[in-house]
Image: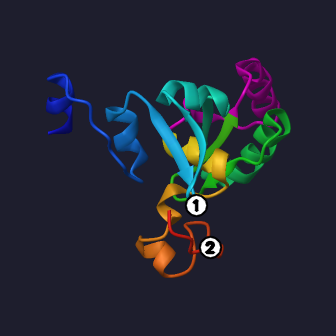
Amino acid sequence: MIRDLVSEGVSVLLTTQYLEEADQLANDVIVIDHGTVIAGGTPDELKAKTGGQVLEVRPAEPAQLDRAAALVARRAEATPAIDAANDLVTTPVADAGILAGIVRDLDDAGISLAEFSLRKSSLDEVFLALTGHRAESLPGNADAAAGDDSLGREVERTPV
């Protein structure tokens, strides 16, 4: 319905914590955290401000996940996220020039790859980079009502 309205030339103000939806529908995004505007721009501009790209590495052998993450961390100068359920290591990448070094490091360590990809950041990842917490952890959802965010930390219950 929103897409139809926009295609007809109607301006729509949409408030949502579902950032995938905002990424698909919005021309401009304003990020508000605890009632304060902290960033704004097009989805692509916001992604570029926070690194813009995410490296995904999936070792062929799930047992090598932690070793792969440690090698990625050295080059990316960031702590990668490890998704053990999907055998995936992800980390923001500001400079794609580090990719060749990561591939060499993984090869030197004998880690074969099932996947190695570079993609644009999602708005969820942008929000996390800007605020230090996920959009889903905002007051009003099940995690926030339980008093923690998706990372298991206490969250402040300030109205947005």
First of labels 2, 1 by sequence position: 1
Q: Which residue in the protein does label 2 denote?
A: 156
Q: Position of residue 36 (x, y in %)?
A: 59, 53
Mark closer to the observer (2, 1): 1
| Residue drawn at the location 32% of the way across and 41% of the way down | 13
Mark 1: which amino acid? Answer: His
Q: Is residue 109 magenta?
A: yes
In the picture, measured across the screen, residue 42 lies left or right of residue 49, that is left
| Residue that mark 1 sits on | 34
Q: Which amino acid, by three-letter code, is at mark 2? A: Glu
Q: Which of 79/112 is in front?
A: 79
Q: Position of residue 125 (x, y in %)?
A: 57, 44
Question: What are the residue bounds of the magenta stretch?
Answer: 93-122
Residues 36 and 120: in front is 36
Q: Is residue 139 left or right of residue 25?
A: right
Say what secondary structure mark 1 lies in. Answer: loop
User: Does the CB distance between marks 2 and 1 fall below 8 Å?
Assistant: yes
Residue 17, x across and y down, in percent? 42, 54
Q: Position of residue 107 (x, y in %)?
A: 76, 29
Q: Residue at x 74, y 22 (%)?
A: 95
